[in-house]
Structures are given as C-alpha cells and as structure tokens.
C-alpha cells in the first residue's frame, strides 16, 4: 500500500526526532567516533589520490592514517617542551607583571583620586572586587566541570586510542559507506538528494579543510612572530589565537587583547605592545587578503555569523561533541534552507498564481 505524503512526512520527522534523541542520550561516548569521522572526512581526498595513482585502498589508508597521527604526535613532542618552558617562565614572572601593571596604573589612579570623591572611589573599588570575584567563580566552575566530569577520563583515553581505529576503518570503507547510503535513498528523490549532498560536501570540504589549514598557518605565524618580538608566552598566545580562529574573528581578537595585555605588563615602554599589535595586524591582513581566499574560498555558503552561532550553540548543548557536529549541521541546514527557498520562490504560494486545473 503506497504511503501518503503526510505519512512520509511523519516518517521522516519521526526518524529525525529519534536520531536527535539518540545523539543526546549517547553524547557522552560519541566524541571519539565523531572525531574519527571528521578526521576520515578530512583525509579521504588524500586516500583517493593515492588510490588513483595505483596504490590499493587498504595500503593508502594505512599510510595516510599512520602519517597523520604520527605527525600529530611528533608535533606535540616538538612543541610541548617549548610550551612548558614558556608557561613555567611566565608563572615565575607573574608577581613582576602584577607589580608592573600596578606601577602603570598609578598615574591613572592619582588622576581618578583628583576628580572623584572618596565615596565614588569606594564604589569603584567595591564593584571591581565583585566583578573579579564573579569572574574567578566562573573560571573555577568551568575548570571544575572540565576536570571532574564523570566521562572526562574515558573521553580522553578514547580520543587517544579509539579515534585512530575509527579513522582507519572509515577511511578504508568510505566508498562502501557512501554507496550503501546511496542505495538507501528513496528512488523517486534520489537524484535531488544526491545533488543536495554534493552541495553539502562542497561547503564542508571548502570550509572545514580550508579552515583547519588556515588555523595551523595562523597559529604558526602568530606563535613565531610573537616569540620573535620577545613576548613571554608568545608561542602559547600565538598558537591559541591560531586555533581559536576556527571561530571567525575570535582568534585574532582574543589573541590581540591577551598579547597586548601581556606586553604592557612585560615592557616598561610602548615598544613591545606596538610590535605585538603589529604581528596581529599583519596576520589579520594576510588572513583576509591572502590566506582565507586561497585556503577557504569565498563562496562556501557559510556566513561567519551563522558559523559563530552554530559553534556556540553546539558547544552549549553538547560540549566539544557539539562543536564537532556544529558545522556539518549548519551546512545541512543552510543547504536545505536554500533548497526550500528556491522551491518556495517557484511555487504559487509565492507568485499568487492558482495551480493549473483549479477554477478561477
């Protein structure tokens, strides 16, 4: 018995609701699997290229997987000692930085005492203490939630040991998985769905792969630049700003504020803050005019505001798992929205024309 349109709609909406509920219930253990899928999606073009050059799919998968994770381990082993040295050196200099900031703030404090009454100064002092206490409470709560979560240790261990396994098997069987999913598509709408999936793939490949390369490039540029100008903790600030650039404008803005703030505490004059600002200005110009157009492209269909909203919403709902799922979901929603809008603009609902065969 053929299914009616309303029945099909209920079927797909029910399936979507069940999938969302399942993801929510299993969110505590899905992280290594989603991470493995993301890495496999990122590396699949390399495996396909080796396969076209005559290398078997199995051996291409083994080589690419080992090279990728070995590269991650090697990068960590090379960078970790430098980061550790900078963090230890920074921690030892924190009292000096605090004293330098107090010394820099003395002229402003004397000016404030000249123009403000003792009651106003006391209110400012009280408000500053309240804000500082609130900020410290937020930071403490955030760190506690990260360090004491029931599945934190499991997620870390699974990311280390399960993600490479998931990546390997998905890379090896990627073409089989896609063929199986294609066979499940409803035959009457299969070509339309394939077209929309191709558009989603184009958006994701253009943004995710390009943005990942952009973040690594910016992190390297910022880290080396800040270290070269003599900023303490330059590598940490630079690489942090580069990685945070996955969210548009977040990395450069936070890196600039943190870097200039550290430079003001470290340097007795304005030379170091100006050089730090110059590093971020040059990096921002390179990002906007050279790196982003070349690596990411300009027609990816994901507006920066939509990307920021998706990442923050995913992180708020599902944590790091939500961050990994945010961009694919944003791409799917964007493609489906454009598809629905195009159908609407061609329909009588938009034009006001009566459907054919209806009485005037």
Image (cartoon, rainbow, N blue to C red):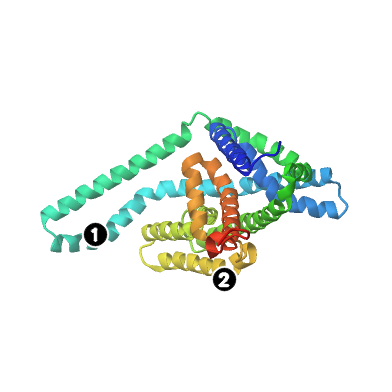
Q: Which residue is mark 2?
A: 289
Q: Which residue is mark 1?
A: 106
Up the image or down, 122 lies above or below 341; here it is above
Q: Position of residue 320 (x, y in %)?
A: 53, 42
Contact, CB < 8 Å: mark 1 with mark 2? no
Question: Which image quadrant is residue 180 in?
Answer: top right
Report whether 341 appears left or right of 277: right
Residue lying furthest front in this view?
359
Residue drawn at point x = 14 percent, y = 60 percent: 116
Q: Does residue 224 appear anywhere in the picture?
A: no
Residue drawn at point x = 48 percent, y = 58 percent: 305
Q: Does residue 43 appear anywhere in the picture?
A: yes
Q: Position of residue 254 (x, y in %)?
A: 44, 57
Q: Position of residue 292 (x, y in %)?
A: 59, 65
**Mark 1: few/some/many CA within 10 Å (<14, 14-19, 20+):** few
Up the image or down, 6 lies above or below 309; here it is above
Question: Which image quadrant is residue 104 in?
Answer: bottom left
Question: Which image quadrant is residue 260 in?
Answer: bottom left
Disc number lying in front (1 or 2): 2
- Disc 2, SS: helix
Residue drawn at point x = 42 percent, y = 56 percent: 258
């Amino acid at each position: 018995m053929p299914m009616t349109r309303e029945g099909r709609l209920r079927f797909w909406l029910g399936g979507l609701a069940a999938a969302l509920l399942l993801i929510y219930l299993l969110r505590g253990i899905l992280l290594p699997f989603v991470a493995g899928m993301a890495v496999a999606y990122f590396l699949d073009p390399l495996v396909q290229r080796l396969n076209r050059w005559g290398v078997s799919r199995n051996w291409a998968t083994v080589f690419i997987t080992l090279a990728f994770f070995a590269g991650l381990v090697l990068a960590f082993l090379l960078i970790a000692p430098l980061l550790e040295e900078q963090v230890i050196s920074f921690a030892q200099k924190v009292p000096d930085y605090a004293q330098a900031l107090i010394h820099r703030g003395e002229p402003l404090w004397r000016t404030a005492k000249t123009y403000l009454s003792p009651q106003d100064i006391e209110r400012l002092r009280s408000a500053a203490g309240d804000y500082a206490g609130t900020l410290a409470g937020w930071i403490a709560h955030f760190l506690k939630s990260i360090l004491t979560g029931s599945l934190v240790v499991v997620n870390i261990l699974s990311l280390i040991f399960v993600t490479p396994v998931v990546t390997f098997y998905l890379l090896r069987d990627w073409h089989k998985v896609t063929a199986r999913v294609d066979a499940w598509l409803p035959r009457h709408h299969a070509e339309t769905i394939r077209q929309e999936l191709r558009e989603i793939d184009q958006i994701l490949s253009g943004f995710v792969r390009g943005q990942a390369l952009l973040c690594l490039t910016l992190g390297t540029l910022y880290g080396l630049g800040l270290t070269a100008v003599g900023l303490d903790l330059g590598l940490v600030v630079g690489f942090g700003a580069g990685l945070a650039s996955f969210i548009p404008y977040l990395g450069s803005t936070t890196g600039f504020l943190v870097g200039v703030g550290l430079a003001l505490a470290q340097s007795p004059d304005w030379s170091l803050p100006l050089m730090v600002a110059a590093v971020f200005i040059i990096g921002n110009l390179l990002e906007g005019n050279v790196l982003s157009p070349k690596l990411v492209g300009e027609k990816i269909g994901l507006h920066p505001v939509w990307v920021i909203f998706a990442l923050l919403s995913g992180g708020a709902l599902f944590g790091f798992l939500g961050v990994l799922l945010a961009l694919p979901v944003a791409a799917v929603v964007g493609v489906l929205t454009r598809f629905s809008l195009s159908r609407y603009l061609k329909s009588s609902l938009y034009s006001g024309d009566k459907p054919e065969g209806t009485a005037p």
